[in-house]
């Protein structure tokens, strides 16, 4: 009897990977290293309390905290018999962490990456990753010296739970947070837990309700979900001996339950692994399926155009042949020569037209509008029945990768569809039947944001 991990890996190898490879769709490595420790990733606006939350979890001030943007690199916290700090290369090559992919982000990233070990029991079962806070400054890439979104994506793909922190100061969310939520974390919302932190700073419930509403409004625009996102309302009690903070007047006991739920969610991370794996497989399956349908549509269009051209070429050649044959009975050589020359020119023109059309098609198929049209035609059935925002959101996520694949393969190779329909049909069966069955075997949990009760805490 195979485990869900094995079944998922098998489906990936037999059904998803061959189609992705055939159509040059960029996907990350699978299977995941099941021996690696589960990861909880802390993301969010600067000074929203990420590092403080980590300190609270491990019961000691292992991370620096402060009101100004404090962290400028990522910190990985894992179990070790002694408290110690090591540099980035140690983190990327650590056998228990499976962070090898991070080395691809370059030396500027690795030089700011830290590995901290602590003899804390929680860290035996989960690895925590603290991140630099998101800011509003444009061109943050340059100030950080490395590709922040790529780093977030790599950690997020590896993570089993992503905590995204907001605080009352920035309910509008920062520009960087919006772009991370809309683009970088696309397709990973099943791991995402949103937290409005520092609720102890609110002066009144209406104040809290206004901020909560603003945050929901902004997030609903950034996250493509059918529902408004769930947001846990949290605060951290000040540590013993810490300077007293200026506090609001809300009855804070109400929010202690939400914090305990978040802590419970973090402790439950190892149990979420199999569930996450199936969610990722389903998401990946949907992405490859949509990519394949769009590629097939482009391939068909190309084939149609080439067949029309072949017919034009054949007709021109036939016409030139008949004209030449008729001209042969004309006594003047000059007339014969002229007809032959016109015939040859017509054939050459038709030939050249075909080459020009093919090149133009290849160029235009990288155009966003043309790709969008191919998507609309490929999904015409679903889109005419009702507006499928989920399908459109999925398309937005994969479009850059589809464009890269089309550029790499060229439309002529997309038109070679031998066996493609069968492969797409097989993937459709996996996405609609086999992977959902795998999820049912795991206990029927849907890839939802955790803590659905969090809205009741408002
Ligand atoms: N009032 C209040 N202050 C908090 C809470 N959590 C953290 N803080 C304070 O907020 C400030 C910023 O906290 P950090 O933990 O450094 O925030 P961060 O998200 O790690 O910040 P960056 O590393 O800069 O992104 C610190 O002064 C904390 O003491 C909370 O729940 N309530
Ligand atoms: Mg910090």
Image: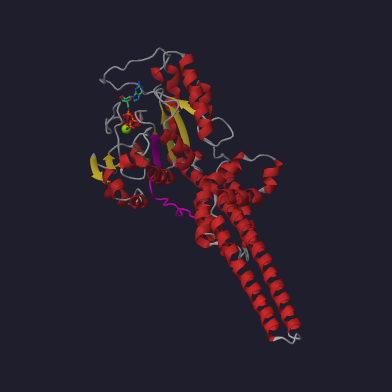
Residue for point 31% across, 46% down = 109
Q: Quadrant of residue 331?
A: bottom right
Front residue (pair 453, 138): 138
Q: Nearer the viewer, residue 255 or 349?
A: 349
The colour scheme applied to this rendered structure is: secondary structure
Residue at 56 percent of width and 55 percent of height:
364
**Which x, y percent locates residue 252?**
41, 17
Q: Quadrant of ligand 2?
A: top left
Predominant secondary structure in magenta? loop
User: The N terminus is located in which quarter?
Assistant: bottom right
Residue 25: give x, y in percent of width and height. 51, 56
Tell me residue 240's x, y (percent): 28, 21
Residue at 35 percent across and 52 percent down: it is 104
User: Residue at image x 41%, y 36%?
Assistant: 176
Q: Is residue 180 above or below residue 328?
A: above
Q: Which residues are magenta?
A: 25-43
Q: Is residue 152 visible?
A: yes
Residue 328, above or below 401: below
Vertical placement of residue 177 versus 240, above or below: below
Could you tell me if residue 75 is visible in this image?
A: no
Tally of numbered discs:
0
- The location of residue 219, given as percent across then percent down, is 50, 31
Is 54 colored magenta in this rendering? no
The answer to if 40 sits in the magenta stretch is: yes
Closer to the camera, 350 or 90? Answer: 350
């Amino acid at each position: 009897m195979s485990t869900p991990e094995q079944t998922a890996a098998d489906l990936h190898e037999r059904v998803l990977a061959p189609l992705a490879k055939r159509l040059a769709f960029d996907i990350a490595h699978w299977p995941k290293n099941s021996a690696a420790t589960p990861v909880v990733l802390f993301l969010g606006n600067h000074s929203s309390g990420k590092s403080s939350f980590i300190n609270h979890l491990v019961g000691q001030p292992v991370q620096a905290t402060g009101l100004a943007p404090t962290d400028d690199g990522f910190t990985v916290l894992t179990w070790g018999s002694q408290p110690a700090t090591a540099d980035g290369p140690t983190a990327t090559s650590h056998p228990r962490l499976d962070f090898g992919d991070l080395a691809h982000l370059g030396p500027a990233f690795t030089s700011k990456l830290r590995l901290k070990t602590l003899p804390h029991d929680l860290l035996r079962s989960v690895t925590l990753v603290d991140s630099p806070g998101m800011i509003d400054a444009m061109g943050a890439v340059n100030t950080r010296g490395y590709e922040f979104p790529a780093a977030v994506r790599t950690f997020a793909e590896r993570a089993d739970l992503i905590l995204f922190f907001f605080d009352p100061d920035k309910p509008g969310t920062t520009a960087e947070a919006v772009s991370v939520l809309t683009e970088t974390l696309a397709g990973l919302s099943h791991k995402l837990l949103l937290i409005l932190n520092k609720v102890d700073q609110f002066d009144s419930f209406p104040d809290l309700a206004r901020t909560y509403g603003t945050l929901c409004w902004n997030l609903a625009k950034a996250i493509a979900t059918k529902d408004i996102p769930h947001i846990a309302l949290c605060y951290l009690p000040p540590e013993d001996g810490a300077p007293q903070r200026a506090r609001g007047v809300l009855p804070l006991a109400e929010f202690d339950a939400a914090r305990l739920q978040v802590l419970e969610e973090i402790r439950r991370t190892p149990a979420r692994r199999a569930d996450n794996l199936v969610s990722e497989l389903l998401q990946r399956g949907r992405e490859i399926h949509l990519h394949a349908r769009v590629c097939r549509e482009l391939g068909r269009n190309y084939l149609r155009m080439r067949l029309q051209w072949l017919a034009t070429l054949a007709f021109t050649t036939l016409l030139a042949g008949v004209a030449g044959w008729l001209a042969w009975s004309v006594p003047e050589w000059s007339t014969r020569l002229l007809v032959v020359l016109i015939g040859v020119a017509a054939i050459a023109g038709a030939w050249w037209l075909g080459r020009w059309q093919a090149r133009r098609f290849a160029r235009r198929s990288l155009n966003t509008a043309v790709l969008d049209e191919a998507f609309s035609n490929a999904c015409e059935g679903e889109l005419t029945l009702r507006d499928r925002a989920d399908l459109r959101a999925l398309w937005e996520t994969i479009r850059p990768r589809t464009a890269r694949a089309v550029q790499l393969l060229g439309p002529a190779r997309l038109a070679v569809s031998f066996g493609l329909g069968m492969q797409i049909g097989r993937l459709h069966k996996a996405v609609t039947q086999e992977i959902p069955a795998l999820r049912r075997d795991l206990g029927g949990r849907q890839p939802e944001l955790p803590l659905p009760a969090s809205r009741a805490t408002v």
